[in-house]
Amino acid sequence: MNRSASLSAPLRRARGIVLAGLAILGLAGVAYAVRRPLTMSAPACLAGRWHGCLDTENGVLLMTLVALPPAALAAWVLARRRRAAGAASAWRMSLAEVGMVYGTVPFVWMTMMPGPGAGIVPGRVSLVPLRDLLTMGPIGIGGNLMVFAALGFFAPMRFTALASVPRVLALGAGGSIVIETAQYVLRLDRVSSVDDVLINAAGAALAALASRRWWRTTAEAPPDRPHPAPASAG
C-alpha cells in the first residue's frame, strides 16, 4: 500500500502540472480572442458613449466579459440557498440555470442586431437547405453553432424533460425559427435562412452530447416506486 501511494503521488503532481499548463494556454487563448473588444470598445464604454457597447459584436463580447463576475456570484447565491434548503445537486442546478442565460443571451442579442438597411430593406428569406453554407464561411458557421450551444449544454442538466438529444435538437430548432421569424417581421436587414436554423439546432445538439455524462445518469435513473403494503394477516 505504501508503494502504491508513493507511485500515485508523482502521478497526481504530473496531472496537476498538465492541468495548470492547459489552464494557462486557455487563458492565453481567451486573452488573444478578446483583445479586439478590449481595445476597440472599452475606451468608448468607459467614457460613457454607449454607442458601440451594445450595438456591435465587439461591444457585446465586452459586456459579456464584464457580466462574468455577476453571473458567477448569482450561481454561488443560488447554490447556497439550495444547499441551505437541503436540495440535491445544488451547484449543478445553479450553474445550469445561470449558464443557460449567460451563454445564450449575448448570441441571441447579436443575431437581433439591425443591419444598415433595417426598416428600409424588405425582409429576405432563403428556404433552400445548404445553399447559404458556402457564403457563411468558417466564422459564420462557428458563430451559428454557438447561438444555442449553452442552452443545449445546460438545459438537460436543469430540466429532466429535456434530457434527450432529439429534444434538445427540437428546442434549438424552435428557438432559431423564432429568431429568424423576428428578423423577417422586424425588417432587421438580415436574411432569414433555413441553414441558420439547421446550424443553430446542430450546435445545441452537439453541446448536449458534450454534457451527456452529467445529465444521462439522472435521466436514466428509475423513478422511485412506493413499495406495496404488506397484506394483513386475517
Image (spheres, rainbow, N blue to C red):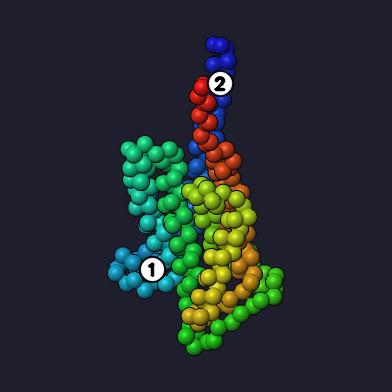
x and y percent of residue 171 in the render?
56, 60
Up-down relation of residue 80 to residue 40 (above or below):
above
- 10 Å crowding of disc 1: few (<14), some (14-19), many (20+): many
Determine if residue 116 is in view. Answer: no
Q: Residue at x 32, y 72 (%)?
A: 49
View extreme (front): residue:
234
The quadrant holding residue 87 is top left
Q: Nearer the viewer, residue 118 or 126?
A: 126
Determine if residue 91 is in view. Answer: yes
| Contact between labelled residues 2 and 1, with CB atoms less than 8 Å apart | no
Residue 53 marker? 1
Q: Amino acid at mark 1?
A: Cys
Label 1 vs 2, first from the N-terminus = 2
Q: Residue at x 41, y 41 (%)?
A: 90
Residue occupied by mark 2: 8
Q: Quadrant where the N terminus lies?
A: top right
x and y percent of residue 132 in the render?
66, 73
x and y percent of residue 15 in the render?
55, 31
x and y percent of residue 208 in the render?
58, 51
Q: Nearer the viewer, residue 82 or 106?
A: 82
